[in-house]
């Protein structure tokens, strides 16, 4: 994978990384820039900062699209900057950040030293529904459309460039991740994003940049997941598991999360 910036709109850049295929965004205004997500460790953030400085020397504001480690463990290296996120993003990082660290060390023990040096820093500027950021004379709209991939997904809209950063509400190259998701709400959240944001260029949290038709197809898959999970909750899993649009391990994780919602 070529970890180079891709300009997807006027002074709007995406960098896709080998680590987890995660995307970071860079929006450059007059005298200021916005960084979307800071990667999964201090080492990865240092690499990101070096790459940012090949584009601009401007001071930055940071946005965390949600509270999963690969999108915020680099926050500390952007010290002094405003870090924006949903209110629940800050709360969950405070509550679960150390669990995130321990989980990665258990899963990837070779990264222990890299993970242990991370200072866990949550967003210090939060909102619940909408916020507007002036990035050097360019307005970037932050929106929370509802539950989906997480409880706190943030979408960043750059209207003057025709670009939307969807975070992990949209995935490319792999099935959506359902680990702490809300499968019954996710389709409606994605539908709301499509209804309110007409942009044609959509940057997923992981994978290649996509268009609205791709997101519409993913919405339909997620709606099918929600419907099948509801059916399985009543009829049992055996007769419907093969109808899910994703591999069985992914489907079972989605079902488990949907059942938690249905049983609540």
Image (tube, grey):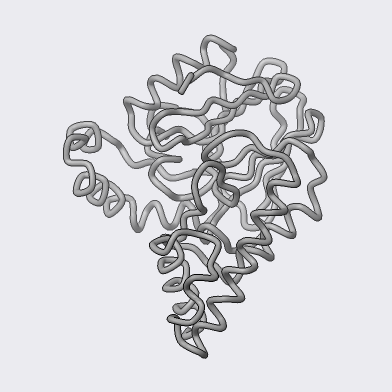
| Image coordinates for residue 203, horizontal then vertical, percent | 63, 37
Horizontal arrangement in the rendering, residue 264 relative to residue 160 (left or right):
left
When the figure is inspected, residue 215 is found, relative to residue 6, above or below; the finding is below
Residue at 78 percent of width and 38 percent of height: 200
Instruction: Examine the rendering and report whether any part of residue 79 can be seen.
Output: no
Asked which quadrant contains residue 46, the reply is top left
When the figure is inspected, residue 131 is found, relative to residue 181, above or below; the finding is above
* Total marks in image: 0
| Image coordinates for residue 172, horizontal then vertical, percent | 56, 43
Horizontal arrangement in the rendering, residue 179 relative to residue 11 (left or right):
left
Nearer to us in this view, 166 or 217 = 217
Residue at 50 percent of width and 89 percent of height: 235
Residue at 69 percent of width and 54 percent of height: 217
Horizontal arrangement in the rendering, residue 215 relative to residue 252 (left or right):
right
Residue at 37 percent of width and 36 percent of height: 40
Instruction: Examine the rendering and report whether any part of residue 90 can be seen.
Output: yes
| Image coordinates for residue 191, horizontal then vertical, percent | 73, 59
When the figure is inspected, residue 189 is found, relative to residue 122, above or below; the finding is below
| Image coordinates for residue 125, horizontal then vertical, percent | 55, 44
Asked which quadrant contains residue 224, the reply is bottom right
């Amino acid at each position: 994978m070529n970890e180079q910036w891709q300009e997807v709109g006027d002074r709007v850049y995406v960098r896709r990384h080998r680590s987890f295929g995660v995307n970071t965004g860079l929006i450059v205004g007059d005298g200021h820039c916005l960084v979307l997500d800071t990667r999964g460790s201090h080492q990865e953030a240092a690499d990101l900062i070096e790459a940012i400085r090949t584009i601009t020397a401007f001071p930055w504001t940071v946005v965390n699209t949600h509270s999963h480690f690969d999108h915020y463990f680099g926050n500390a290296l952007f010290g002094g900057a405003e870090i924006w996120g949903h209110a629940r993003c800050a709360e969950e990082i405070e509550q679960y950040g150390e669990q995130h660290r321990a989980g990665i060390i258990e899963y990837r023990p070779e990264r222990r030293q890299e993970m242990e040096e991370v200072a866990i820093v949550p967003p210090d500027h939060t909102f619940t529904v909408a916020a507007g950021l002036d990035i050097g004379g360019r307005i970037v709209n932050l929106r929370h459309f509802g539950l989906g991939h997480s409880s706190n997904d943030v979408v960043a809209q750059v209207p003057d460039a025709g670009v939307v950063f969807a975070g992990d509400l949209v995935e490319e190259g792999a099935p959506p991740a359902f680990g702490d998701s809300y499968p019954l709400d996710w389709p409606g959240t994605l539908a709301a994003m499509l209804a309110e944001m007409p942009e044609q260029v959509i940057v997923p949290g992981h994978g290649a940049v996509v268009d609205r038709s791709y997101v519409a197809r993913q919405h339909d898959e997620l709606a099918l997941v929600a419907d099948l999970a509801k059916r399985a909750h009543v009829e049992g899993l055996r007769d419907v598991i093969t109808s899910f649009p994703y591999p069985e391990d992914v489907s079972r994780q989605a079902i488990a999360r949907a059942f938690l919602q249905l049983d609540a």
